[in-house]
Amino acid sequence: MGKRTEFLYMSEPDTIAAGVLDTQRCIDNAEEVFKLLAQGDYLMGGNNHNNHGMYIVFPKETPFPNMPVAGPDRRFVAMPAYLGGRFNICGQKWYGSNAANKKQGLPRSVLMVTLNDKDTGEPLCFMSANLISAARTGAVPGVGARYLARKDSEVLTCVGCGAIGKACMEAIVTAMPSLKKVVCNNHSHEKAVALANYITKTYHIEAVAETNLEKAIRVADIISVAASRTAPLHFNREWIKPGCTILASGPLQCDEALWMDMDIVYDHIGLHHAYVEDAIQSGDKDDYYSGVIGGPIYRLIDAGRKPALDDSTSIGQIILGQKEGRTSDDQIICFVACGMAVFDLGLGYDLYHTALEQGIGTKLLLWESPKQCED
């Protein structure tokens, strides 16, 4: 007889019960994953083991009546990975995205994470991942703030106040107990007001909504960028205070003076190599650069004006003590974070084991015995 296989299904309420909203836990988990990335104990997609994922991007036109066509944020993405260390797990984040979802009462993206046995391939857990993705995305700049921001930072400016912007804010506030004020800026002012009210009520620190981007930036010791790709941003050098830390979880444009004055710290250099490889293979490198967070920096690297990726610094190297982070109070640092499935796996793994310990979730049967073994 073949082996009985069952797996755990975790709904969104199950992930909440297992601790996905525990911000401190998420930051610590992300820091552990950064160490494994810097040590090389991971795998992601592609021959280079560093690809962000595989995309289905829909055409602008199609002769087939049922085939979807391109639209804002419309795509499907598969993000497979292996994560080593104590996790020792394979898995994948899979999601579909469509800006029109909001008209149907849905998030822009609908995400799931699967955890698999690294040897047999059996599913271990299939879990709702919208909150996992938001929590791990927020936790990454939380780690960035922990290691790169001035310890006396008092003002955080959040550019982008949606679900991801909120998750980033919560992690940064958790990591930086010195903060006394949060300034919220968003394309939709109502969301900025809502986030400011939430911050005041939840964290009992001053929070205000500011419609003018320049005013919001000028007062900041830390800037969290988590705005939609459909709301392009542009920062000028004269807006930025000495010693400011910019945590870029979303795309931004800066004038050349600012890019040149900033020291760049990457989430994982291998990922950015993979982006550049994909840009070259696309046949239109400049257009590809326009669609990724690090694109403006890659252009400067190509022009010989910023250090090559292999001569640059990742946050994991700083955590491990292999390279320095902040070296002066006046240094302006930009932490570039693009998102990787290893973080979904790391957080998902801990939630899965909490669920097993506490009896959370629903066990589902794959088979009593695989039919192929019986034939």
Image: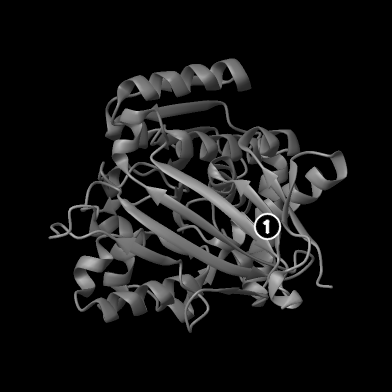
* Amino acid under disc 1: Gly
Identity of the residue drawn at 44% across and 62% down: 263
Coordinates of residue 56 in the picture (x, y in percent): 34, 62
In the displayed structure, 337 sits above or below 247; it is below
Identity of the residue drawn at 13% across and 57% down: 61
Coordinates of residue 372 in the picture (x, y in percent): 69, 75
Coordinates of residue 295 in the picture (x, y in percent): 31, 64
In the displayed structure, 367 sits above or below 282; it is above
Q: Nearer the viewer, residue 99 or 293?
A: 99
Instruction: Using the rendered image of the protein, determine whether residue 22 is visible from the camera's viewpoint.
Output: no
In the displayed structure, 372 sits above or below 341; it is below
Identity of the residue drawn at 30% across and 50% down: 74
Coordinates of residue 317 in the picture (x, y in percent): 62, 70
The residue indicated by pointer 1 is 346
Q: Quadrant for residue 147, please give it.
A: bottom right
Residue extending farthest bottom: 47
